[in-house]
Structures are given as structure tokens and as C-alpha cells.
Image (cartoon, rainbow, N blue to C red):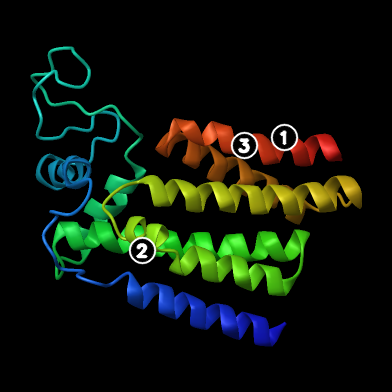
Amino acid sequence: MKKEILILLFILIGAFAIRLYRFDAPVADWHSWRQVDTSSVSRNFVKDGFDLLRPKFDDFSKGVSLIDNPQGYRFVEFPFYNAAQAGLFVLFDRLTIEEWGRIVTIFSSLGSIVFLYFLVVRYMNSRAGLFAAIFFAFAPYNIYYGRTILPDQSMVAALLAGTYFFSNWIDASIRYQVASIKYWIWFVLAVIFTATALLLKPYALFFTLPLIYLAWNQ
């Protein structure tokens, strides 16, 4: 097991390094408009204060909602991602706010790799877990979206974490009938991470099907 963890560590280092490609480049790549909109919410948090219930961006048009929006409200996803991006910028302003957005996404991507590995190990074996981690870490699509200023990767990480903790809880508490509070902490973590994923992207609801399957199977 120690050897597999060491290999996983090298995968994470490689995934981190490759996602630093053009780290300080302007936000002018694919989906730049969506990344700019996301980052503008974080900039307004820094400028106007952290009002998580009234996030604003720099678009006052009604092109998306078809409703007049003179205040520039952006009610798309709950701004956990923006709060992390803006908060890190306020605390450590050596990087630009866009670079902090990429940092948040990169570490979310690394978290996804870790939880994916442990889920696959649980239901298959460590070799399959390492292959899953490698493909997730180095698939070109994941490399690109694993460094964009978008909340999607954070949603994936939260969802995988919720699935992992739910799997741990259901195995211990139901299959083995262990009533220790430690396993209920896993259940609480599963609820928190899954709820966070749903707030970040409502379509994460579709990916709760594995949780329903695990519960039904037990």
C-alpha cells in the first residue's frame, strides 16, 4: 500500500505541474467569457465586501436572464468558489485574483484525483485506482478544465468527496452495524460535501445516483 500511495503522490505532483502551464496568461482562452464572469464576482467581493447572498458581476444587461439587472446580480451558482478565490487574494495578494482562481481550481482537481483513487480502490483494487488517477490527471480535457477559473472542478471534487464519505458510512454503519460516532461523522461530511456540490452546480443532482444505488444495495 505504501508503494501505491507513493505512486499517487507522483501522479499528483505531475498533475499539479502540468496545470501550471501558462499560469500567468491573460484570461483569453476557451470559455474566456465565462471565466471572466466568474472572476468578476470575486473581484466585486474584494471591492464591495463578501455578500454571499447577493453576488454581483460586471454585466448589467438582460442578455442571459431576459430580466433587467441594473444591480449586476449574478445568481448562477452559490459563490463558494468566488469566496475562496477572493479570500485568498485578500490574504495573500502576491498573485493576481485570476491566478488565485486557477490555484483554487488546480487544488480542487488534485482533490478529485485523490477521492477518485480511493473510491476505485474500495470497489476494485489499487492498480485500477492508480489507472483511474492517471487518466483523470493527464487526460487533455481534464488538464484544461483543471486550471480554468470556473467552479465546475470544485463541484466534481465535492461530489467525489461526498460519495467517498457516504460509501465509508454506509459500509460501516449498515453492512457491519458499527454505531460509533466516528462513522456518523463520515455521514455528516457526506451530506456537507454533497450539498456543496449541489450548490456549486445543480446538475450535480444527476451524479447522486450512485449514492441512491449504494443505499438501495444495502
The amino acid marked with disc number 2 is Ile
Q: Nearer the viewer, residue 5 or 180?
A: 5
The amino acid marked with disc number 1 is Ile
Asked if residue 119 is positioned above or below residue 5 in the image, the reply reads above
x, y percent for residue 18: 34, 74
Residue found at x 75% / y 62%: 122
Q: Quadrant of the C terminus?
A: top right
Q: Mark 2 vs mark 3: which is more N-terminal?
A: 2
Q: Tag 2, which secondary structure?
A: helix
Q: Gap between marks 2 and 3, in whole Å?
A: 24 Å
- Location of mark 3 (residue): 208
Q: Mark 1 vs mark 2: which is more N-terminal?
A: 2
- Location of mark 2 (residue): 106
Whether residue 177 is visible: no
Marks 1 & 3, CB-CB < 8 Å contact: yes
Marks 1 & 2, CB-CB < 8 Å contact: no
Q: Gap between marks 1 and 3, in whole Å?
A: 7 Å
